[in-house]
Amino acid sequence: MKICGIVAEYNPFHNGHKYHIEKTKELTGCDAVVCVMSGNFIQRGLPALFDKWTRTRMALENGVDLVIELPTYYATASAELFARGAISLLDSLNVVSDLSFGNSCTDIEILKRIANVLFLEPDGYKKELQKEIKKGVSYPIARSKALQTFLKKEIDSNLLSKILLDSNNILGIEYLKALLYCNSNIKPISVERIGGDYNSIHVDRNICSATGIREMLHNNQLDLVKEVMPDSSFNIMNREILHGKSPMFIGNFEKEIFYSLRKSSAEDLKNISDVSEGLEYLMKKASDECNNISDLIDTIKSKRYTKTRIQRLLIHTLLDISKSESDTFKHSPSYIRVLGFTKNGEKILSKISNCSNLPIVTSVSKYLKTANDVGKSMIEKDILATNIYNLGYQVPSYRKSNEDYTKPLCTII
């Protein structure tokens, strides 16, 4: 059985995702697809629109055979650590032959060259990076400028600039870098993205970015959303909405975030993961001066600190992800947390159980009885993330605790 891996958030699952899966099967000839998917909070520093089990069912209905949760520490981290955690997890299964990701650059060799520079960090590149950082720009911009200077004799500057401005290309480069980091034998496959770009809100050939769909949902434009999602995904989503589980946005956690900030001292905030360079003082000051989440983010963000980074800091504060915790998990996940599978996925799980050294978690309570300290801490953060996520529901009956213990696996057998 040939098995291909995908890393995704499916926030929510749309026609572009379905195209990616179908094209992946066509290009690789694989028999099955395994997806490592973010849980209830995602890499952009936001809550997922719908919980991880709902999004798992969307994926299983549309060509994915096995969904594995990317632990919260990685799911809410920088693109580098997000990719490293996800690729390390796929690699540790020891059954995945190919990694497929969507991007706008059709030349994967260029992406590999960029990834190689970022992985090896030659002296010339590091020198240029430090020059750019001293200018006070954000790290992503500094890195982009440094790469353009270092690779100017190999890659046209305009082309390189265009590549590095695209979020999908950047994430693809991080996947390639993570493959190098893991010394993995998994072969990368790039699927050209169709329709609007990552941040586009426009519809093209019944395809719209997740960003656009989130905007539509925020405006309650379900008629437009229906056109850009597979019927099964839309029906799953609509059923959740009709039952009172409206899409989740960062504003749902406004009070909880302000509480976390206002109860903390600047010294407490300094210990939160990814807080550096005096950001703790900005966060503390803004939390005292602002009264809503939009103003809070706008007050903290700057030329140096992007909106996405600030959102991640707020989610790290909300989930109490400290520097000491995140430093422990910079290498690889400690378990394979199964969220759902098809009949084909059941066969894959059987193969994984014979090939992987990591424990397969289908019961959180059972895993905790035998988990080591790192694994225990990691999965307890996943449990906390779900417990806090559920506080965002408007309907009180959905604010349940410990669903990670009680929620059944999603199965399509």
Image (cartoon, rainbow, N blue to C red):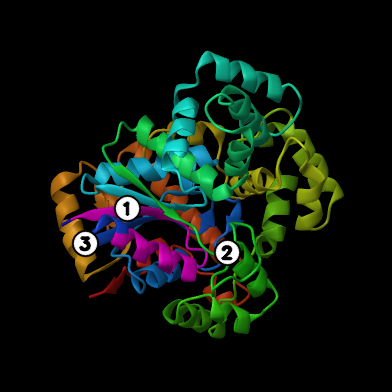
Tally of numbered tags: 3
CB-based contact (under 8 Å), mark 1 and mark 2? no
* Mark sitting earlier along the chain (1/2): 1
Which secondary structure lies at badge 1?
A: strand
Q: Is residue 134 left or right of residue 13?
A: right
Which portion, as a residue range, is magenta? Answer: 2-26
Q: Is residue 11 magenta?
A: yes
- The three-letter amino acid code for the residue at tag 3 is Asp
Q: Give the residue at the far left of this rendering.
A: 354
Which residue is at a point 59% across and 57% down the rendered structure image? 198
Estimate the x, y position of residue 141 in percent, counting from the top left.
Answer: 67, 35
Quarter of the image for residue 278 reads top right
Q: Give the residue at the far right of this rendering.
A: 289
- The three-letter amino acid code for the residue at tag 2 is Ser
- Which of the numbered marks, if any, corresponds to residue 209? 2
**Quarter that holds the C terminus:** bottom left
Which secondary structure lies at badge 2?
A: loop
Relative to 210, does residue 36 appear above or below in the rendering? Answer: above
Which secondary structure lies at badge 3?
A: loop
Dot 1 corresponds to which residue? 5
Quarter of the image for residue 159 reads top right
Relative to 340, does residue 43 appear above or below in the rendering? Answer: above
- Which of the numbered marks, if any, corresponds to residue 31? 3
